[in-house]
Image (tube, helix red, strand yellow):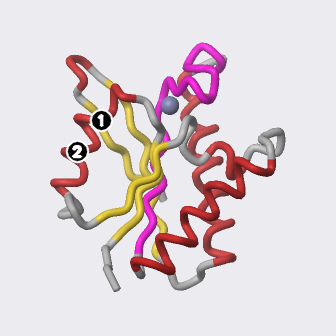
């Protein structure tokens, strides 16, 4: 049995890769974390217009990570200006965009907690800055 600490669900967006590597390093998760990269990160989990197969795909990854690697923590990471959400331009204001991601992340957490009450779920919102610097905001 191979075990690891956590499962990270993140957007496929390549611009975040250097920042996510740093994030994993800083949280002692490099080499100790399953990774799921999918456009829009957790959007398909909570978006009622998303095809059921997309939702099932993500749930299956969570289930496999938990069953095969006994992960104790899931990190749900969305990011601002995400193409999966239509980018920042899809929102009237930066506040509206932030609120949407926060609401989606919380809804995804609720859904995961219903299925896996023993798992710790951490919510993170990433923002790309200058020279691929990524800032990570942890949400309640
Ligand atoms: Zn994205």
> Which residue sits at x=28%, y=43%?
20
Residue 113 appears in the rendering: yes
Give the percent coordinates (x, y) of residue 125: 44, 43
Give the percent coordinates (x, y) of residue 137: 37, 45
State the separation of the CA atoms marked 1 and 2.
6 Å
Report the side of 139 relative to 22 (left or right): right
Q: Is mark 1 within 8 Å of ligand 1?
A: no
Q: Which mark is residue 118?
A: none
Quarter occupied by residue 100 = top right
Residue pointed to by mark 2: 21
Q: Is residue 103 magenta?
A: no
Report the side of 25 relative to 140 (left or right): left
Quarter occupied by residue 88 = top right
Secondary structure of the residue carrying tag 1 is helix
Above/below status of 76 relative to 66: above
Above/below status of 1 relative to 21: below
Marks 1 & 2, CB-CB < 8 Å contact: yes
Give the number of callouts: 2
Residue 139 appears in the rendering: no
Q: Which mark is residue 17?
A: 1
Q: Residues within 10 Å of mark 2 (few under 14, many from 20)?
A: few
> Which residue sits at x=50%, y=80%?
67
Magenta stretch in the rendered image: 73-91
Give the percent coordinates (x, y) of residue 26: 17, 55
Return the residue nearer the eye: 117 or 34. Answer: 34
**Which quadrant holds the N terminus?**
bottom left
């Amino acid at each position: 049995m191979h075990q690891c600490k956590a499962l990270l669900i993140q957007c496929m967006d390549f611009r975040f890769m250097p920042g996510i590597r740093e994030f994993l390093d800083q949280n002692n998760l490099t080499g100790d974390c399953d990774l799921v990269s999918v456009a829009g990160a957790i959007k398909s989990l909570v978006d009622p217009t998303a095809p059921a197969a997309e939702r099932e795909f993500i749930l299956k990854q969570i289930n496999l990570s938990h069953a095969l690697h006994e992960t104790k923590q899931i990190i749900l990471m969305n990011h601002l200006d995400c193409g999966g959400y239509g980018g920042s331009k899809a929102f009237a204001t930066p506040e509206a965009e932030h609120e949407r991601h926060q609401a989606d992340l919380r809804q995804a957490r609720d859904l995961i907690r219903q299925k896996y009450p023993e798992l710790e779920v951490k919510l993170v919102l990433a923002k790309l800055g200058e020279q691929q610097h990524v800032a990570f905001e942890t949400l309640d």
